[in-house]
Amino acid sequence: MKALIIVDVQNDFLPGGSLAVKDGDSVIPVINKLQNHFDLVVATQDWHPADHKSFASSHPGKKVFDEIILNGLPQVLWPDHCVQETHDAEFSPLLDTKKIEAIFRKGMDKNIDSYSGFFDNGKKKATGMGSYLKGRNVTGIFVTGLAADYCVNFTALDGLELGFDSTIVIDATLPIDEKNFKKVVEKFTSKGGRLIRSREIDCV
């Protein structure tokens, strides 16, 4: 079975949010339409405590987008975003959530970031999504959502490493940085990942 993964389609990543992806809301109609092609749809949700160490506000003297080493790992410092129990962390009201069978929250440990929907950035803790998908006999994943060069890419990459056929639906995602996305996609495809457009879904 194949599953659709919807990554972080939350208010803070959409126009008007603190970490908005340019035109990020334009992918939502594509994602909504795609859901009709899958028997299993799951989603991830960034769910940070207010004092998360990936926030620039947690590091006096540092600015948004500065890079530091956090517990031995490279860390981009972000604006405060997707704080637990806030409107900013909620899914966009434009996203059709009726078919979403399970939601996997990430980034809850304040001391480590979590780009991937499967693990934190240090691979210290799993979210449970990998086991859940394998328990449903999923063999292939199609990854959509925001942002393409971070959470979508790392989710798709970890999916490959877990043994799933992994595909990014390129018109159902957008990056923060287009140049960065081109670079990370080369790594993804070199490891066996695929890129397709939504109109090709029926052909795979």
Image (cartoon, rainbow, N blue to C red):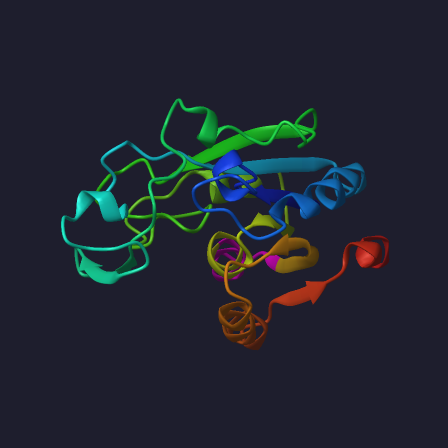
Viewed as shown, does residue 54 lie left or right of 13?
A: left
Count how many numbered circles sit on residues in the image.
Answer: 0
Which region is colored magenta?
Answer: 155-165
Above or below residue 15? Residue 47 is above
Residue 114 in the image: above or below residue 109: below
Residue 109, image x, y percentages = 26, 38
User: In this orientation, which residue lies closer to the viewer: 70 or 77?
Assistant: 77
Within the image, what quadrant is residue 156 found in? bottom right
Measured as percent of width and height from the top left, residue 44 is found at: 51, 38
The image quadrant where one finds the C terminus is: bottom right
Prevailing secondary structure class for the magenta stretch in the rendered image: helix
Query: Residue 132, can we see it?
Result: yes
Q: Is residue 15 magenta?
A: no
In this view, the residue farthest toward the left is 60
Q: Seen in the image, is 75 located left or right of residue 204?
A: left
Residue at the image position 84 percent from the left and 55 percent from the top: 199
